[in-house]
Image (cartoon, grey):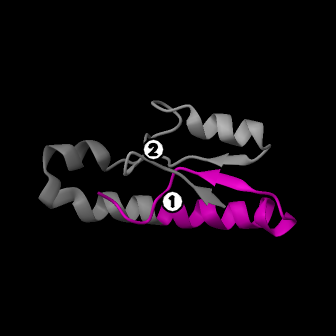
């Protein structure tokens, strides 16, 4: 699995940056995007960061675990490459 960082920041490939999609299409790789819109805590997080940061991050963590499990079952176990916009170190 390949992660991509642009200008020292993790990128949102599906909206702002087409580089990840170009890489995945050019090399015939599966694209793994972070699911942002489905996070029910995100709006509350921006209203009160201190109150909702834990719930917001737990949603992202659990979602990422599920996505990585699915990617492993359906792609990595079959030696298929995956491009991801995830980066473990946040800025």
The earlier-in-sequence mark between 2 and 1 is: 2
Q: What separation in Å lies between label 2 and label 1 (alpha carbons)? A: 10 Å
Residue in front for this viewpoint, 19 or 86: 19
Tell me, yes or no, whether the highlighted magenta stretch contains residue 7. no
Residue 22, image x, y percentages: 66, 34
Of residues 68 and 21, the one drawn nearer to the viewer in this rendering = 21
In percent of width and height, residue 68 lies at: 62, 64
Q: Is residue 19 found left or right of 30 in the rendered image? A: left
State which region is magenta.
Answer: 62-91
- Residue at position x 40%, y 60% in the image: 59
Residue 8 in percent (x, y) is at 37, 51
| Residue at horizontal 67 percent and vertical 40 percent from the top | 23
As drawn, is 69 to the left or to the right of 51? right
Q: Which quadrant is the N terminus positioned in?
A: bottom right
Give the residue number, with chain letter if any, for mark 1.
63
Quarter-of-image position of residue 2:
bottom right
Q: Which mark is residue 15?
A: none
Left of 48 or right of it: where is 60? right
Q: Report if the CB atoms under discs 2 and 1 are less than 8 Å apart.
A: yes
Q: Position of residue 52 (x, y in %)?
A: 21, 57
Task: Judge the density around disc 2: few (<14), some (14-19), many (≥20) Cα neighbours within 10 Å.
Answer: few
Quadrant where the C terminus lies? bottom left
In depth, the one of 79 and 19 nearer the eye is: 19
Mark 1, other Cα within 10 Å: few <14 / some 14–19 / many ≥20: some
- The local secondary structure at tag 1 comes to helix
Say what secondary structure mark 2 lies in: loop
Name the residue that disc number 2 marks. 38
């Amino acid at each position: 699995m390949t992660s991509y960082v642009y200008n020292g920041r993790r990128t949102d490939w599906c909206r702002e940056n087409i580089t990840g999609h170009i890489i995945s299409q050019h090399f015939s790789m599966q694209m793994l995007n972070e699911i942002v819109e489905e996070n029910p805590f995100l709006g509350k997080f921006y209203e009160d960061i201190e109150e909702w940061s834990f719930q917001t991050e737990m949603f992202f963590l659990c979602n990422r675990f599920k996505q990585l499990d699915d990617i492993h079952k359906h792609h990595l176990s079959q030696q298929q490459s995956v491009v991801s916009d995830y980066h473990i170190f946040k800025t």
